[in-house]
Image (cartoon, rainbow, N blue to C red):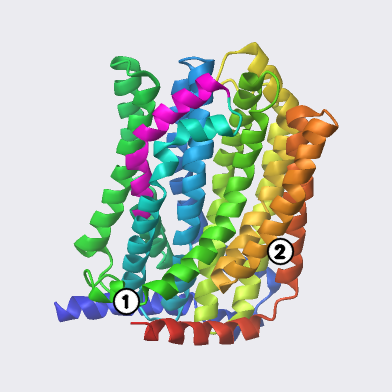
Amino acid sequence: MPGEGAVEESKVLLLGDHFGPRLEEDDQDQSLTKRVWIESKKLWQIVGPAIFSRLTSYSMLVITQAFAGHLGDLELAAISIANNVIVGFDFGLLLGMASALETLCGQAFGAKKYYMLGVYMQRSWIVLFVCCILLLPLYLFASPALKLLGQPKDVAELSGIVSVWMIPLHFSFAFQFPLQRFLQSQLKNTIIAWISLVALLVHVMVSWLLVSKLQLGVIGTAMTLNFSWWVLVFGHLGYTVCGGCPLTWNGFSIEAFSGLWEFTKLSAASGVMLCLENWYYRILILMTGNLKNAEIAVDALSICMTINGWEMMIPLAFFAATGVRVANELGAGNGKGAKFATVVSVTTSVIIGIFFWVLIMIFHNQLALIFTSSASVLKAVSHLSILLAFTVLLNSVQPVLSGVAVGSGWQKYVAYINLGCYYLIGVPLGFLMGWLFHFGVLGIWAGMIFGGTAIQTLILAIITIRCDWEKEAEKAALHLKKWSEVK
C-alpha cells in the first residue's frame, strides 16, 4: 500500500539522517566523551550483530575441523589444508571482490540512492559467479597442485578428495558475500545474525548425523559445510526478496547486465587488496608443509591459524562496521564524521585485541585441546602461542584500517601496499628465518608477521592519519554520480 511505503521510506530516511551529517552539525558542539559515546553506539549497532554472525559462520569451519581432528592426524591435516589453502584461497578472492559493494552500497545508502543498492548486488552476483566458474580447476586439481607445492603425498591426496566435495561451498560464496554486504550496508545486521545462528545450529546437527552417526568420515565433514553455507544463502535471499528490503530491492533488473566491465574492475581491485592479505597466511601453511616432521608442524600451525581466524572475526566485524560508517558519512558529505568514526573504531578494536593477547599468553598450554589430544601437537601449539598472541594484537588494527580503505574506495592503492609488504618483504624474510637460519615454523611465522603485517599496518596508519577527509567526501559525491550513470 502507498501509505506503508511512505512510512517505510520515512524510517529509512530518518536512519540515513541519523548516520549522516548530524555529527558535523550537532555533535561537534558536545563534549568529547559524549561524541565518543554517540559514535560508539552507532558503531556497535553494526559491530555487535556482525561479530555474532561472523563468529557463528566461522564456527562452522572450526566445528568441521574439530570433528576431523578426532578422526586422526591425517584427516585433521587434510581438512586443514583444504580449508586453509584451497577454500581459503578462493574465499579470500571472492570475499575481496564482494567488498566492492561496501564502497558502492555504503556510499549510495549514505546519499539516499536506495534503488542502486539492489542493482549493485545483482552485478556482483554475475561477476562472482563467472569468477567461480573460472576458479573450478582449483578444486578439481587440488591434489596434484598440492604435491607440486611440496605437501606430503597422503595429505595432498586426501585434501584433493575433500576439495572436490567442497565445490558446492565454492559456488555459495558468489551469492552469500554480496547478499551479506547488501544487507550490512543498509544496517540490517540483526537479520544477518539470526540467519547465521540458524545455520550454525543446522551445521551442528548435520555434522553429528553425517560424521558421528553415519560415519562418513572426512567426506562427511565436507558435506556439512556445503549444506550449512547454502542455508545462509537461502536465508538471506529469502529475507531480501520477500519484502525485507522494500526500498533497496525492486526485483531482478536488466540493468544488472550493464556496466559490468567497470564493476569488474572495481571488484578486481577489491579482490586483490583483500586476497593478498588472506592468502598471506595460507602461504605460511604451505611453507610449513615442506619442513621436517611436516604433519605435526602443519597440524600445530593450522590450529593456531584456526584460533587466530576465530578471534579474527571480531576485527573483521570492525572492518565491516568501519567500512559502512566511513562510506555512509562520506556518502552524506561528512568528512569529519568519517574521521571520527575511524578513530573510535580503531581505538575500540585495539582494546579488544589487548584483552585477547593477555588470554592467549595465560592459557597457551590449553589452546589446542578442543582440536586434538596429541601430546606432540599440543606442545607445538604452546610453543607457537607467543606468535599467535602478537598476530592477534596486530590484527586488531590492520583490518580496521583496511575497512577505512574500503569505505573510502582506496582498494587499488592498498593492493599495491599489500603486495609490497607481504610478498616482497614478509615471505622472503619468513623463508630466510625458517630455512637459512633454521628456526623452522617459528622463524617462518615471525618473519612474515614482523616483516610483512607490521610494516603494512604502519603504512596504512600513516596514510589514514594524513588523509584529507573533506576532500574524500567530495570524491565520494563524484564517485556516486559516476556509478549512478553507469547503465
Q: Residue at x 34, y 48 (%)?
A: 171
Q: Which mark is residue 465?
A: none
> Comparing marks 1 and 2, which lies closer to the viewer?
1
**Front one among 31 and 148:** 148
Determine whether the residue tagged by mark 2 lies in a helix, strand or loop: helix
First to last magenta residue range:
152-174
* x and y, in percent, of residue 284 in the image: 66, 38
Task: Please rate how many residues cluster around mark 2, counting C-alpha atoms within 10 Å: few if below 14, some from 14 to 19, many from 20.
Answer: many
In this figure, which residue is indicated by the disc labeled 1? 258
Task: Please rate how many residues cluster around mark 1, counting C-alpha atoms within 10 Å: few if below 14, some from 14 to 19, many from 20.
Answer: some
Which amino acid type is shown beneath numbered disc 2?
A: Leu
Q: Residue at x 32, y 76 (%)?
A: 258
Q: Residue at x 62, y 26 (%)?
A: 298
In this figure, which residue is indicated by the disc labeled 2? 460
Q: Earlier in the sequence, mark 1 or mark 2?
A: 1
* x and y, in percent, of residue 266 in the image: 49, 70
Dividing the picture into quarters, in which one does residue 416 lie?
bottom right
Q: Is residue 479 left or right of residue 290?
A: left
- Secondary structure that dominates the magenta span: helix
C-alpha distance separating marks 1 and 2: 34 Å
| Quadrant including the N terminus | bottom left
Q: Is residue 214 left or right of residue 24?
A: left
293 w.r.t. 179: above or below: above
Q: Please state the total of marks drawn on the protein image.
A: 2
Residue 173 among those drawn in magenta: yes
